[in-house]
Amino acid sequence: MTQKNQYMSTQEAIDYFDSLDTVAADDMIGFFWKGEGVDTDHAMDGMLEASNWWGKAFIGPNEVHPLVHRGLVKDRFYVNPGLLPLGLLTRLPFRDALGPFLFPVISPLISTRKPKARIRMLEFRGKVSAAMCYDQKPINDCFRKIDADTVFGWMDFKGMEQPYFFKLTRNETI
C-alpha cells in the first residue's frame, strides 16, 4: 500500500524551496538517499511510490543512479529512466493501482547496472546548489538543504509546466 505523502500547494512548495539553503554536491556523494514524493496536485503525484521507488544513489560525480527501486528478487535495483515514457505514464488511468503489479513484471526490461545521471553544482532560481542531471532525459533534479541529512528536490523537466517536488533523506553509505 502506498503511503500518503506530505501535501503542499505548488506555490507553497516553490516558496519553501526558494527559502532553503544550498547543498554541496560533495555532501550527497557516497550515499543512498531514501526518496519520498511531496504531493502538489502534480500529474506524477504517487506515481513513483506506486512503482516501488526507493530513492537515489550518488556513487560519484559521474555515477548517479536516479531511480533506485525495491524489487521482488533483489532488495534494490536501478532503473534506466531513458526507457520510461514519462509523458505517457502520467496520462495512464489507474496508474497508481496498476504500478505495484505492472512494474515488477517490466522491471527486468528497464533495469540497468550503469549509472544514468551525474551530479553538478548548478545555478537554479538564483542560487548555486547541487543538481542531478539525467543523461537521457531533459531533466535536472535541483536540491536545497532542509537539514544535514535531508534535501528538498525540484524536478526541472523541460516542457513540463508544473514542477514535481520530492524529499531525499540520507540513508546509508554506498
Image: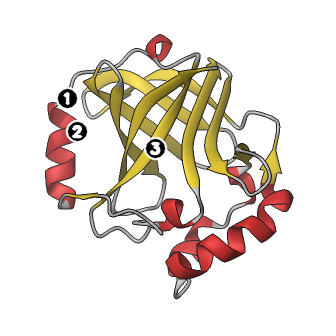
Instruction: Residue 170: give x, y in percent of width and height.
Output: 44, 26
Label ID, residue 17 = 2
Q: CA distance from mark 3 to mark 1?
A: 18 Å
Q: Earlier in the sequence, mark 3 or mark 1?
A: 1
Residue in view at x 70 percent, y 46 percent: 136
**Residue 120 seen from this side:** yes
* Residue 169: quadrant of the picture: top left
Label ID, residue 35 = 3
Instruction: Residue 129: give x, y in percent of width and height.
Output: 36, 22
On screen, 136 above or below 10?
above
Query: Is 88 situated left or right of 1 in this image?
Result: right
3 or 2: mark nearer the eye: 3
The residue that label 1 is drawn on is 20
Give neighbour class at mark 1: few <14, some 14-19, many 20+ (Cα, 10 Å). Answer: some
3 or 1: mark nearer the eye: 3
Element on which disc 1 rests:
loop
Query: Is 172 situated left or right of 150 in this image?
Result: right
- The residue furthest top is 26
Q: Could you tell me the amino acid type at mark 1?
A: Leu
**Residue 164 seen from this side:** no
* Residue 173: quadrant of the picture: top right
Q: Name the residue nearer the viewer: 110 or 4.
A: 4
Q: Are marks 2 and 1 in contact (CB under 8 Å)?
A: yes
